[in-house]
Image (cartoon, rainbow, N blue to C red):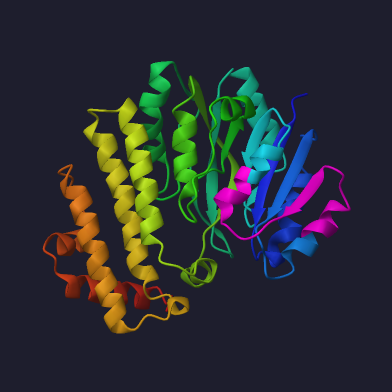
Amino acid sequence: MKKVSIIIPVYNMEEWVESGIKCITEQTYENLEIIIIDDGSKDGSYMKCLAEADKDRRIAVFGKNNEGPGAARNLALRKATGDYIYFFDIDDYLEKNAIEKFVRYMENENTDLVVCSFSMFDGEKVFRTVKKADGLKRTGGDARKDYYEHMFMYGERGIQGAAWFKLYKTDIIRKNGIEFPKLRKSEDDVFVARYVNCIDSFYMTGDVLCRYYVNSYKRFWDKYRFDIFDTSRQSTMYVKDIVLNWNRNNKDVLQRIYDDYFHKTFGSFCFLFNPNLKLNRKARYARLKEITDIFMDDISCDGIEINHPIFKCMKKKNYRAIYVRIVLHIWKHKFD
């Protein structure tokens, strides 16, 4: 029986530690090593993880200074001894037979990457299920060429590049020196693109094996206390360079990459109102203007248009209209 390394970065997630680890230790697939990296938590997360490790010998807990989830996962990858890798976020949920099914598909389909369907949870209820193309398999040159087309088709914006809901082969990661970049956000987009760049096949299943906890803006603001646009832009440019190697003349894939970039830029506009940043109105407006100009310079190089009213304002450099629309959006969703 092949061993699966479950990699779990933790940062200030004390309330989720017990339930998150429980859904891993109760997996029907038992040959697991569970590597938890506490990324310099300031709450009781580290001690709670140690307490859970005392209950199950498969759990190993390591602490480090805070550098973001990418650096935490890289440390865990160096320590992993499993044949396969699964990345798990402590506030998400896995069905009890999830790892068993992942491994079965990996071996029965003789593939390099397995991607499952997932549901989305807002803290009270599941409000959406994102189904992948059930039984879709691509091999050879079609694997890299078709991967992003199908991920953007069946995924949520901002989620298709996530490290979770996928099972990876450790030897591919090690052989190609694949790691997460030193970014504090959207780092998994780059990791997945680097991995896909090295595979010969992938398999997608319609089985809903995991549940993603969607952050509210308040929780999102508490999680990130820095300007997120620069990291989102860096990850987009990394992914664009890699993906266009396989899809050089694919305008549709380029459009989808920029749609995702716009989605992240919209989030960056909203993030300017994060009270933790302590920005006054003048500073928010200046940064919004700067972000708009950078985004429009990037997108104009490729002649891409985005079908969104705020993009129309960005194109006209109507910064005041953008600002007002973002304020109304935040007020409407009661995230202020």
Q: Quadrant of residue 19?
A: bottom right
- Can residue 291 be seen here? The reply is yes
Residue drawn at point x = 73 percent, y = 32 percent: 81
* Residue name at image x 71 percent, y 54 percent: 20
* Quarter holding residue 177: top right
User: In the figure, residue 78 lies in which quadrant?
Assistant: top right
Extreme residue toward the left, this view: 316
> Is the residue 11 above or below the residue 81 in the image?
below
Please indicate, yes or no, whether residue 28 appears anywhere in the rendered image: no
| 295 displayed left or right of 53 | left
Above or below, 206 relative to 163 = above
| Membership of 124 in magenta stretch | no
Q: Measuring from the top left, give residue 270's x and y in whole percent.
A: 36, 69
**Residue 62 in magenta?**
yes
Q: Please state the horizontal and vertical placement of residue 80, each as a whole percent of the image.
A: 71, 36
242 in relation to 45, above or below: above
Q: Position of residue 319 (x, y in %)?
A: 18, 71
